[in-house]
Amino acid sequence: MVTVAALYHFTPFDDPAALKGPLAQLACAQGVKGTLLLAREGINGTIAGSRDGIDAVLAHIRALPGCAGLEWKESEAAEMPFARLKVRLKREIVTMGQPDVDPRAGTGRYVDPKDWNALIEAPDVAVIDTRNDYEVAIGSFDGAIDPQTKSFGEFPAWWEANKDRFHNKRIAMFCTGGIRCEKSTNYLIGQGVEEVYHLKGGILKYLEEVPEAVSTWHGECFVFDQRVSVGHGLVEGNYDLCHACRRPISAEDKAHPAFEEGVSCPHCIEDFTESDRARFRERQRQITLAEARGEAHLGRLADNTAR
């Protein structure tokens, strides 16, 4: 089995570029793959590899300035879910586009997974899913509000347009692993919201710790690697990925007339030109040939940027 570690940590890096090379070299030497993002505000990413390899990379990250308190979430995959290692320099480790937002200055009150159900079932609590629309579409918590955003950067505008709906409400927010809520809860505090809560460890920690029999989660959780989705107990889910639009697709989607493997699905059939689809068909042909030779093709294993 392959160990998968999802991590983030907000801490000031004076020179993130200086951290990139040594981190990439160690991860490569250990056979670890995935995506790590470095910015002045910290580090974010998802990596996969052997137990020893993951331990070595995590030890290296914990030794970086301000990262001794790094927390991460682990799961397992039957096969390596990434094609390669990417260590990238970014302006933000999760893009919100709000320069005044600083999770180090304060976030919503953390709520452990075991206490989450009781909080969100309270009548004076509004539960907001901060993920993108395609993530929400395959699973969420009972009664959660879907802002229907296509990117996290759209959240502030959504809040401004909808904030009056939440007058005299306590706000509970959640996302995949917790990083988006670090910023979104800080943003709401800056907007004057007095009681803001944040699911500690995100959906992944909830699915890991809360038994399915008492869970208020329905569906699966989209993850940013080749597993596509996970369910309770963090077992690999039932979704595949459309390699044209990178959205999750179900068995029903694959039975739809608009589905062509590697080329289109019901979600993106109107989004691409015939020229685009011709390129996708050639890519799919190369993937099929590589698989026939017993080789991995980067077009098949291309990973999303960790969120």
Image (cartoon, rainbow, N blue to C red):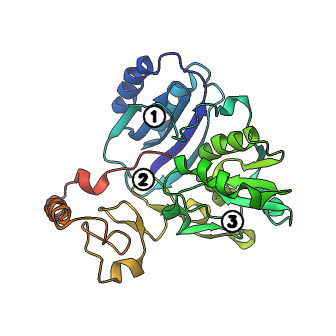
> Which amino acid does the dot numbered 1 rest on?
Leu
Q: Residues within 10 Å of mark 2 (few under 14, many from 20)?
A: many
Measured as percent of width and height from the top left, residue 286 is found at: 14, 59
User: Are the residues at dot 3 and dot 2 in contact (C-beta closer than 8 Å)?
Assistant: no
Secondary structure of residue under mark 1: strand
Measured as percent of width and height from the top left, residue 274 is found at: 17, 67
Single out the mark in the foreground, 3 or 1.
3
Q: Which residue is mark 2?
A: 225
Secondary structure of residue under mark 2: loop
- The quadrant in which residue 140 appears is bottom right
Q: Which residue is mark 3?
A: 144
Classify 191 as above or below 258. above
Q: Which mark is residue 37?
A: 1
- The quadrant in which residue 85 appears is top left
Q: Earlier in the sequence, mark 3 or mark 1?
A: 1
Q: Which residue appears at 62% of the width and 64% of the height?
A: 146
> Which amino acid does the dot numbered 2 rest on?
Asp
Q: Which residue appears at 52% of the width and 40% of the height?
A: 94
Single out the mark in the foreground, 3 or 2.
3
Residue 148 shown left or right of residue 102 in the figure:
left
Measured as percent of width and height from the top left, residue 244 is found at: 29, 62
Q: Residue 92, can we see it?
A: yes
Q: Earlier in the sequence, mark 2 or mark 1?
A: 1
> Which amino acid does the dot numbered 3 rest on?
Ala
